[in-house]
């Protein structure tokens, strides 16, 4: 499976409505702290927008709702995976991306045979407090050797200047939140990401 090299992560369908029409091909809806009705409405809206704009939607965390809403790709962290039912996910035929941060997590992820494996944080991130030190590019290289042919997603502190480094180290896709959502001009920054990832597409 080929992932687009630009993997946008946002926390609302409103962001998807704003940025996906610019040409984003891979987007994750990552919503924390919302009631089930609100989540369902956001997922439904995100799914419709992504279908209209030929963008792959990946739903973070809320795998049951994603299945119920007819989505076809989810992302889970290691704790999410422990609480989830892999057989149910497989029965639904939904694709699965998994987070990893160390060797033990990598072994757990490989055993689940996911559709991609994410490694982070490659650089320091301001989005959330993490217990892992930045992994660095050597770690991206080591992960690529361990996961291939499963696609590798790099995440954490990425910006356009860091993209060539992570792709040269073996990442297949680069995931981003704050470099875009906290940018003074998110639309212009999104276009910059699309352009900068073009040679890796
Ligand atoms: C592409 C990608 N990689 C990693 C994560 C992090 O997932 P997780 O560890 O479950 O943490 P939360 O994002 O749920 O806070 C991700 N969401 N996407
Ligand atoms: C959501 C997330 N997961 C990570 C991991 O390492 O698993 S790093 C991260 C935050 C990514 O945001 P930004 O691009 O703003 O650094
Ligand atoms: Mg999670």
Image (spheres, rainbow, N blue to C red):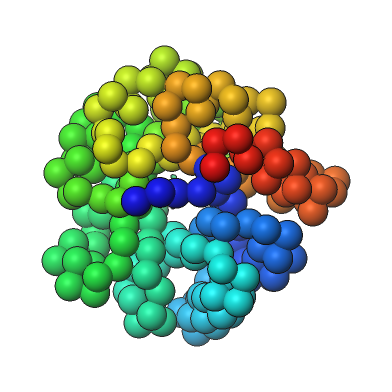
The single residue placed furthest to the right in the displayed view is 184
Q: From this viewpoint, is residue 126 visible? A: no
Tell me the quadrant of the picture where the C terminus can be found: top right
For image coordinates 59% across by 51% down, the residue present is 8
For image coordinates 31% across by 61% down, the residue present is 95
The image shows a total of numbered marks equal to: 0
Q: From this viewpoint, is residue 181 visible? A: yes
Residue 139 location in percent, x, y?
A: 39, 20
For image coordinates 68% across by 36% down, the residue present is 196
Quarter holding residue 147: top left
The single residue placed furthest to the top in the displayed view is 138
Residue 97 location in percent, x, y?
A: 35, 52
**Left or right for 47, reference 69:** right
Q: Nearer the viewer, residue 81 or 191?
A: 191
Quarter holding residue 94: bottom left
**Left or right for 43, reference 94:** right
For image coordinates 38% across by 64% down, the residue present is 73
Residue 96 location in percent, x, y?
A: 31, 57
**Left or right for 13, reference 29:** right
**Is 78 placed above or below 72 here?**
above
Residue 177 location in percent, x, y?
A: 62, 46
**Is 80 placed above or below 143 here?**
below
**Is 159 placed above or below 192 here?**
above
Q: Nearer the viewer, residue 173 or 134?
A: 173
């Amino acid at each position: 499976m080929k992932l687009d090299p630009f993997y946008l992560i946002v926390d609302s369908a409103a962001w998807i409505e704003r940025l996906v029409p610019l040409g984003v091909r891979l987007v994750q809806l990552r919503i924390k702290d919302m009631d089930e009705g609100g989540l369902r409405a956001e997922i439904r809206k995100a799914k419709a927008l992504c279908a209209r704009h030929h963008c792959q939607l990946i739903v973070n965390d809320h795998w049951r709702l994603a299945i119920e809403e007819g989505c076809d790709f989810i992302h889970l962290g290691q704790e999410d995976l422990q609480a989830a039912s892999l057989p149910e996910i497989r029965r639904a035929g939904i694709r699965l991306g998994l987070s990893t941060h160390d060797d033990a997590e990598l072994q757990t992820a490989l055993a689940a045979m996911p559709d991609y494996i994410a490694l982070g944080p490659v650089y320091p991130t301001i989005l959330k407090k993490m217990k892992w030190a930045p992994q660095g590019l050597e770690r991206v290289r080591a992960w690529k050797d361990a996961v291939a042919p499963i696609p590798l997603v790099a995440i954490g502190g990425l910006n356009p200047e860091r993209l060539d480094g992570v792709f040269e180290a073996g990442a297949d896709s680069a995931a981003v939140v704050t470099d875009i959502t906290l940018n003074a001009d998110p639309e212009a920054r999104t276009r910059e990401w699309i352009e900068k990832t073009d040679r890796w597409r």
